[in-house]
Image (cartoon, rainbow, N blue to C red):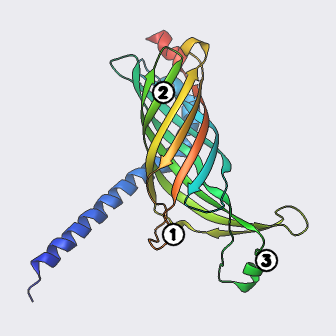
Amino acid sequence: MRRDPMMNAAATRRCSVRMRTILLTAAFLLVSATADAQVLISILLGDKLNTGKIEFGLDGGLHLASIHGIDQAESMRSWNLGFYFDIKLADPSWMIHTGVIVKSTLGTENVPVYSVGDPNLDAAFRDGAVTTKLQYFNVPIMAKYRFDKQFFVEAGPMLGLLHKASDEFGNSVQESDDLTYRLKTKDDYHPLDAGMMVGAGYRLMGGRGMNLGVRYYYGLVDVLIDDSTPDQYNRALYFTLGIPIGAGKAKAGA
């Protein structure tokens, strides 16, 4: 039986796209699987990870997350934690900021309740609200420019790998939000997210101390798999504190 050459070419293209997706996902999984351990290792081995050209440290703080495209929803407060590398370039004013935000829950709250297919649950949460939580391992890759040793601006892409997703239904019976129900929703979302991040900050102690910064993430990928629903995009405003680990010793030994 002879096969149509056009069908073979289409199958080859589909296989190629599928293979690229698998390889990219595998790369993210490799990073995310070791991320928690590396945050702990960084505390112990910060001196070794810092060199004259690379600054290593912990990065974390508070962020306000929302999902653009959901009516009536409100911003959700959450905490983030990760580690960073500032890679210095030939021009001392420029560097590359990257790393992994290990704990980073995006999403939104006060989402209108929808049916879960169970009449009892639908009745119990009819007057409640839903909080959507999307937990990512995020990898920023930003160009960072220092005006002097203390003020800086940064911008570039951020990629995310989704590892958990849930809708948390809440309602008040006798006390505030004393009735809850969690529905796992990871299969409803694309595993990869991408967008642009911009930020600005200030380095304490004359450029030798901690970094205080604010960053804004603008998602460019529709997070939902279902194409029949309105597009939804991640948004987040980060307030960060960056703590270099072993940087002082690295400079002293340079």
Q: Residue 89 lies in what quarter of the image?
A: top left
Work out whether mark 3 precedes mark 2 in sequence or the reverse, and give the earlier one: 3
| Residue receiving disc 1 | 187
Residue 213 located left or right of residue 231: right
Q: Nearer the viewer, residue 123 or 182?
A: 123
Tag shown at residue 97: none
Question: How much space separates mark 1 and mark 3, taking CA atoms?
Answer: 25 Å
| Residue receiving disc 3 | 124
- Give the answer, above or below, for where 12 lies relative to 103: below
| Residue 153 x, y percent position in the rendering | 48, 27
Question: How much space separates mark 2 and mark 1, taking CA atoms?
Answer: 37 Å
Q: Amino acid at mark 1?
A: Asp
Q: Amino acid at mark 2?
A: Val
Tag shown at residue 153: 2
| Residue 168 x, y percent position in the rendering | 69, 65
Q: Do we see residue 122 in this rendering?
A: yes
Residue 135 located left or right of residue 62: left
| Residue 6 x, y percent position in the rendering | 13, 76
- Secondary structure at badge 1 equals helix
Could you tell me which quadrant the N terminus lies in?
A: bottom left
Count neighbours of disc 1 (C-alpha within 10 A) and say few if under 14, some if 14 to 19, many if 20 or more: few
Q: Residue at x 24, y 63 (%)?
A: 16
| Residue 75 x, y percent position in the rendering | 66, 51
Work out whether mark 2 precedes mark 1 in sequence or the reverse, and give the earlier one: 2
Q: Nearer the viewer, mark 1 or mark 3?
A: 3
Q: Do we see residue 34 in this rendering?
A: no
Q: Residue at x 53, y 36 (%)?
A: 83
Q: How many marks?
A: 3
